[in-house]
Amino acid sequence: MYFTDRIEAGRRLAAQLHHLKGEDLVVVGLPRGGVVVAAQVAEALGAPLDVCLVRKLGVPFQPELAMGAIGEEGVRVINDKVVRATGVTDRALAAVEEHERGVLEQRARRYRGGREPARYEGRTVLVVDDGLATGSTALAACRIARARGASRIVLAIPVAPHDWAARIGGEADEGVCLDTPQPFYAIGEFYADFGQTSDEEVIACLEHNRAAHATSDAPPGAGGASPEHDSAPYDRAVRIPAAGAELDGRLTVPRGTPGVVLFAHGSGSSRKSPRNRFVATGLNRAGLGTLLFDLLTEAEAVNRDNVFDTALLARRLTRATEWLREQPGTQDMAFGYFGASTGAAAALWAAAEPGADIAAVVSRGGRPDLAGPRLPEVKAPTLLVVGGRDHVVLDLNRQAAARLSCEHQLAVVPGATHLFEEPGTLESVTELATDWFGRHLA
């Protein structure tokens, strides 16, 4: 069994865990990649998401091979078999452990921001990772959950060696694994995209789940998709009718917000893009509403021509805007567009439509050149945000800015590449977008 990426793995894993829905449950992901998988599971089960802080102790000359793991609550797991086979000395092991303990404490501060861990006592704790190799980190996570008083521990993973259950040794009360292929060399060989997950993506998953549960008691509007502007904050999954399709989305409307920002994701992405969710959460904290939705159905996205059809994507964005204007709680609000990569072209194209009445547009690492002749017709104030090291796209944005006749600004984030994966760069994007939308939507 192969997975496109961690998001798909999480969805497929969630489908095997529906028997846990309705329990007093907390889902915990192992950073960093496991949190992305866990976020999909938590959303499907309607459960809170936490991070279980563990660190692999890698063999000094072969860091990907785990000789053990450490975690919160003083948990320490050593794989004596690996230590003996690799000849790692006690001194070398202690040095690795000291370094990883420092990283563990740093990440605890970064991911939780001073908040306490979720309550485990008396609850079912669902431990999720993106895969299991030696089992050291999963074993450590289960022991942390037990130390914090979990009444039941379930370990869920997309892929593992055939003897994975023996490696856990009864530390989990239940185990769920989608595939146990033979031979098994590394987790990454079973993913088409196993790129490194950033701290920003982990934080985005945690913040998005926290925001959803903070507003989960809000009463839904008509059909579960129409918030009352003056009622409690609103956060719900929605379905947007389009020509011959229904588009899945998530609408978040903080109390008293002046407007809603609609997100147009880039090629190969979706409403669950961790980077867009990170920015959306920042906008929500600033009191702005957001609509994250799929521009294409899963069946449509298989055809790569659709993925790069700017006119089609712009029509979908326009339709979502029309739908939002029809909802009782948002019909009188201002609307903005946030476009990422190729989605930025769709945002600018849609904003150029006659009568679009869009208050502001923000492009992150966008391809505004794909909007072609529509650029001079854009009337909405437009902010183009580009990474300083994204040289080709930066040049394309400079050329596009010269063709805009509306109020516009080109903001360059120093040190950032196209995906804004470098520490602090996605925060800079969020600050720039929050300021731009805050001024123009209000």
Image (tube, grey):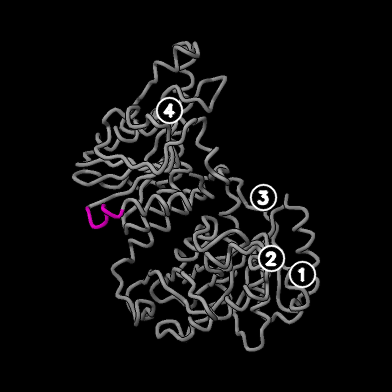
Residue of label 3: 416
Magenta segment = 18-23
The type of residue carrying mark 4 is Thr
In which image quadrant can residue 111 be found? top left
| Disc 2 secondary structure class | strand
Q: Which residue is at 46% across, 69% downward?
A: 249
> Which residue extends farthest front?
182
The type of residue carrying mark 3 is Ala
Q: Position of residue 173 (x, y in %)?
A: 24, 38
Numbered circle sitting on residue 384: 2
Per the model, the C-alpha gap separating discs 4 and 3 is 35 Å
In which image quadrant can residue 435 be found? bottom right
- The one of 243 and 148 positioned closer to us in this rendering: 243
- Verify CB contact (< 8 Å) between mark 1 and mark 4: no
Q: Residues within 10 Å of mark 2 (few under 14, many from 20)?
A: many
Answer with mark 2 or mark 4, whichever residue precedes in sequence: 4
Per the model, the C-alpha gap separating discs 2 and 1 is 8 Å
- The one of 319 and 176 positioned closer to us in this rendering: 176
The type of residue carrying mark 1 is Ala
Judged left or right of residue 58, residue 425 is right
| Disc 4 secondary structure class | loop
Residue of label 1: 401
